[in-house]
Image: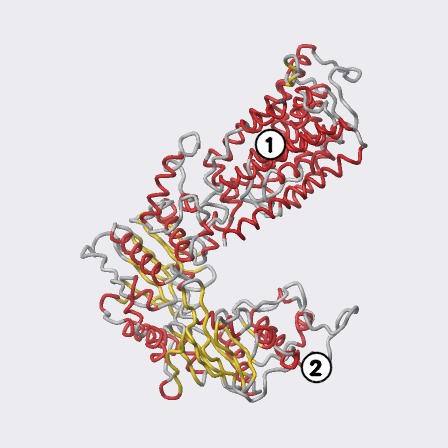
Amino acid sequence: MNTGKSVDVSASLAAPPRSVKGSLSAIVRAGGLLGAIIIVAIIFDLLNPAFLTIDIGISVLRSMCSVAILGLGLTLVIVSGEIDLSVGACYGLASNALAVMWIIGGLPIYLALLGTLIVGALVGLFNGLLTTWARIPSFIVTLGSYNLLYGLSLFITSATTFNPAYPPEGHTVAPGQLNFFVSLTQQLGAHQFSAEIFWMLGIAAVVGFALHGSLFGFRLYAVGGNATAARLARLPVDRLKTIAFIASGVLAAIAGILDFSFVQTTQPDIGLSQTFPVFAAVVIGGASLSGGKGSIIGTMGGAFLLAELQTGIAVLSPGPYAQQIFLGVVTIGAVGLDILASRIRTWRGK
Amino acid sequence: MNSEARRAAFAEGQPVSLRGVTKRYGNTHALRGLDLDLFPGEVLGIAGPNGAGKSTLMRILAGEEEADAGEIRYGDATYGRDFLARHVAVVHQEPQLFPNLTLAENLLVGREGTRWLRPRLSRRDSNLLADLDASHLANRLIADCSLAMKQRTEVGRALARDAGLFLFDEPNSALTADESSALFRQMHELAAAGHIVILVTHRFDDLVRHARRVVIVRDGQVAATLEGQELTEEAIARQLVHGLSASGFSRISTGPGQNRQAQPLLSIRSWSHGGSAFKEVDLDMARGEVIGLLGVEGSGAREFLRSLARVEKATGEIAFEGEDISSVEGAVAYVAPSRTDSLFRNFSVASNLLVRLGRPMIAGAAGSLKRRAMRDAAQQGIRRFMVKTPAPDAPITALSGGNQQKVAIAQAVMTRPKVLLLEEPTRGVDVGSKREIYTLLGDLAAAGGAVMFFSTEVLEVFEAATRVHVFTEGRLSSPLDVRRFDHVEELAAVVTRIEDHVAQEPVA
């Protein structure tokens, strides 16, 4: 039953990938992912009949949220032919900046949220300009900003942890503001359906439109597919890439805000460990690190699969090692299968 | 191939014979039973129009490709592909070296002769460096060496591994006059040492001056051999285009009409290249014209066209219908010579056609794509440009080279430019597609636009252009009205005379 639910969700995510380019291969890829999601669900259910329940299904959806939102931004950057290693660190900086502005700085929550989004946008602008204007490879730029942002997080928080319900001495948080902040991800209905899931789906729809339904997305694929040709075609290559980086920064900030609201604590190193799962989700979703390839539905599917594995293993609780091993196997396996499938296709095409 | 042949160098003093060498790509016959004898000690020139099989011949000789039929032999033995790959040296315009290694290390790579230790130069290698006049540069990174020195290093690499056949493929197009004469000196030395030396170039004066024989490759065969008295630039030029105008293509009949006094569409004054490839060029372009620019590499013709597309920097005045060009974005569209620089491999045929369009053609106010308009435009483009594709959504890689080129040109034309600029519009394109492309260019001009293209082929400008300008050493010739010439040979002869004239007495 619950498998049916997850199917509906991943099928209705965002706009269907109607992109003019390779829509067929995107559908095949999404279909393959869907198959993997169902098979994994069946395996876990055989191992532990308590797995296929609505509660666990919702918990999977909730736990995929931050990886998915970060992955949506990363997908834009990767489609444009660049890379953003700083998404996890940006998520952390956003969450900590929010805490500092709101709890320590005493800024009203609404302004603090706006400020946090601006922080994300500035991080993206920084990455984007260094990549396009200064022509430093984005791998280097964002490897640098990963450390830089983590350093900033440590600096602004003085390496402490925040919880708005228990502000440090000398500071107060207005109860109304706290309620508003917590309500961003409040649990709804009998099954504790977190509002964070709606945020995720709404954002996926918006980013899905931007990538698959708008001129911006069409050109982003062109830039990632062949930057030289895009320049000769007089497309604004640098601007498009910079916008992708800014979107990635803003989405990371949103993910940071939502997780902070849900968990209600933030610490300086939060988000750093998200970096690689986010890449795994995007790559499992069919994006190519050489650019010009990737889809929103794929990234969402990748994030779902990872969350499913994580939850399933947590339920079985064989030990902390299993999750890491699975993450590695699934990442290599998904991309390996994809390459194998495309080889078979060309071989049959001959 | 037996191990004996694997070890042996080219047999000394014996000619190498190509017999019945044939190569097909799909339905195209690149080589049709080519016969050719190569003699040690001579510099052999090879000339031929693009697509005549010249480059296929080079690749087979260099062991990069296997012939479908025929053999390359000396005496009783045949040379296999592995042998050729090892013993034939190719010197390109862009040397294939390791830019991150030093000049000396480049000589050693691949035959280090040591298992664990870092290889060192042998006495013989040191002598070789001295012969190359490169001892003082031994420890310099190849990336920091001049092109001439890179080419010399490439020759050195070949000598070090006992190559016996040297193929120089347009080697001096980017060299200075001094560097060029040094290169030719080296070629003659190689020949004198008993090696086989082959020179492939579009520069007829170099062929006449340095080759003992020049063979003309046409339609995949050796069509003629010129030597002695017969070997003149004009003879080569005529041979290259001989019989080709019988392709059945009805030549472009549009023209600037009689309204000469009307304002030119594009007017260029004192146009000078940022890198001094051309200087002080003046040119007017009227509606309905298809202007062909001819010139060997380094003559400035290519750079001139690219500068109009603002792909290269140039200064001067350029006016479009009397206005400054920068204010009429979209009036000029440019098609790159290589399809890899125009096409998006991750896109379908349809998307490749539409990629240069924007609002309002394919997207609405909010930036949302107009699916129906896109589909209609793509289908229209496919029809208009005669693109043979299984479906609009087919991947671009599924198309033949000629059809990919049509898509590349269509992509630019779909922006409805007033002036279309093309660099080598039919490079690597089959005859049928060539004809269709020429028709399209003519149609575009007839519809009130103007077309300018750069080509290395006299036949191409003869078939596609209304007016021709020849670039020599950065200067533009007076226009040649293509329609005055009944045969491509006559045009070729005139073009050669222009190029020759300037080469001998530079215009002050």
Q: Is residue B416 left or right of residue A56?
A: left
Dot 1 crowding, Cα within 10 Å, few <14, some 14–19, many 20+: many
Out of A337 and B405, give the one closest to the viewer. A337
- Quadrant housing residue B464: bottom left
Is A178 situated above or below B264? above
Out of B55 and B368, give the one closest to the viewer. B55
Q: Residue at x 56, y 79 (%)?
A: B79
Is B337 situated above or below B231? above
In this rendering, which labeled residue sits more in front, label 1 or label 2?
1
Q: Position of residue B183 (x, y in %)?
A: 53, 78
Residue type beneath disc 2: Arg
Label 2 marks which chain's residue? B
Q: Secondary structure at mark 2?
A: helix
Q: Position of residue A102 (x, y in %)?
A: 69, 19
Residue type beneath disc 1: Met
Does residue A151 appear anywhere in the picture?
A: yes
Q: Secondary structure at mark 1?
A: helix
Q: Residue at x 64, y 21 (%)?
A: A112
Residue marked by disc 2: B124
Q: Is residue B251 left or right of residue A310?
A: left
Residue A300 has which mark? 1
Is B15 situated above or below A316? below
Dot 2 crowding, Cα within 10 Å, few <14, some 14–19, many 20+: few
